[in-house]
Image (spheres, helix red, strand yellow):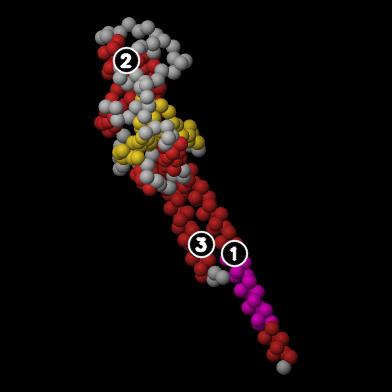
Amino acid sequence: MATLRDIKRKIGSVNSTQTITRTMKMVSASKLRRAQTDLEKIKDYAVKMEELTGRVVKNMPADAHPLLATREEIKKVLIVSIGSDRGLCGGFNTNVALTAENFSRQNRDTYERVGIYVFGRKIRDYLAKRKMDVIKSWVDIKNVDQELVDAVAGEIIELYLTGEFDKVYLSYTYFASPVKQEIVFEEFIPIKTPEDVEYIDYICEPDRMEIVGSLIPRYISTKIYYALVESQTSEHAARMSAMENATNNCGEMVRYLTLVYNKRRQEGITNEMMDIVGGAEALRGT
């Protein structure tokens, strides 16, 4: 049975933990506001870029560009999974890693190879422990800038064009709200035009094929940039929610331990009073 000193020490420890989690929640809330600002800047551009690309490439022959052609036989598939380097953000990283792991295991007999291109130390370590085929990992990314995105887009395009992989999927966390984030798993390359996209016969200058040749790589880099920013925003939101839950749990634990402490103290006082009364009665009887 824990003594009063042990309970009091535990209350102090939980209070210290609560202070840390409350501070981390405030830090995450501040980072989330900045991340939302960055997301708002890129979101409209990314949506318009996707719409424009869909309209321009619609009704074009599949051989107009190598990134538009669907290969007859899909043997090797690449998953681009975007997570984070840090933990303490609930199931943020685990959900993305599980999506890649489940797809790989479920399609083990369908494809010859399922490779995973990883962003984030947590996802890399999770998949490496489970013997998944991690072909490359990006860790310790301080800032998402155009240079980084262009390098990543160039590598992924090269992997597809050289025949290393026949299809590419993109997996990241979509920021729906500060309390809701959703996993996105979608086909990335080859580029597919949605059926509901309206075809517009643009007057092109220079030639339409030349425009498509420069537009598609730009679309791919924009999509990766957008997915990275979405993921970062979702990470801060998930960490803020996790730290808020941890802070509330610490408060409940402190209330429970305080109740236990008071009961034990009252029991001790009662026992002492009974000993005194019993001793007094014994003396009176003699």
- Say what secondary structure mark 3 lies in: helix
Q: Residue furthest right?
A: 285
The C terminus appears in which quarter of the rendering?
A: bottom right
| Magenta segment boundaries in residue numbering | 261-277
Q: In this view of the protein, which residue sits in the foreground, 156 or 138?
A: 156
Identify the residue under disc 1.
260
* Kind of residue sitting beneath label 2: Asp
Q: Position of residue 264 (x, y in %)?
A: 60, 69
Q: Position of residue 16 (x, y in %)?
A: 45, 58
Name the mark on residue 11. Answer: 3
Name the mark on residue 63. Answer: 2
- Magenta region, main secondary structure: helix
Asked if the magenta segment contains residue 1, the reply would be no
State the separation of the CA atoms marked 2 and 3.
Answer: 69 Å
Which is in the foreground here, disc 1 or disc 2?
2
- Say what secondary structure mark 1 lies in: helix
6 horizontally vs 40: left or right: right
Q: In this view of the protein, which residue sits in the foreground, 42 or 37?
A: 42
Q: Is residue 41 visible?
A: no
Q: In this view of the protein, which residue sits in the foreground, 154 or 238?
A: 154
* Kind of residue sitting beneath label 3: Ile
State the separation of the CA atoms marked 1 and 2.
Answer: 74 Å
Q: Position of residue 35 (x, y in %)?
A: 39, 35
Q: Sequence order check: which comes first, mark 1 or mark 2? A: 2
Residue located 51% across and 47% down the image:
245
Q: In this view of the protein, which residue sits in the foreground, 164 or 181?
A: 164
Q: In the displayed structure, would residue 273 be above or below residue 175?
A: below
Residue located 49% across and 66% down the image:
9
Q: Is residue 283 visible?
A: yes
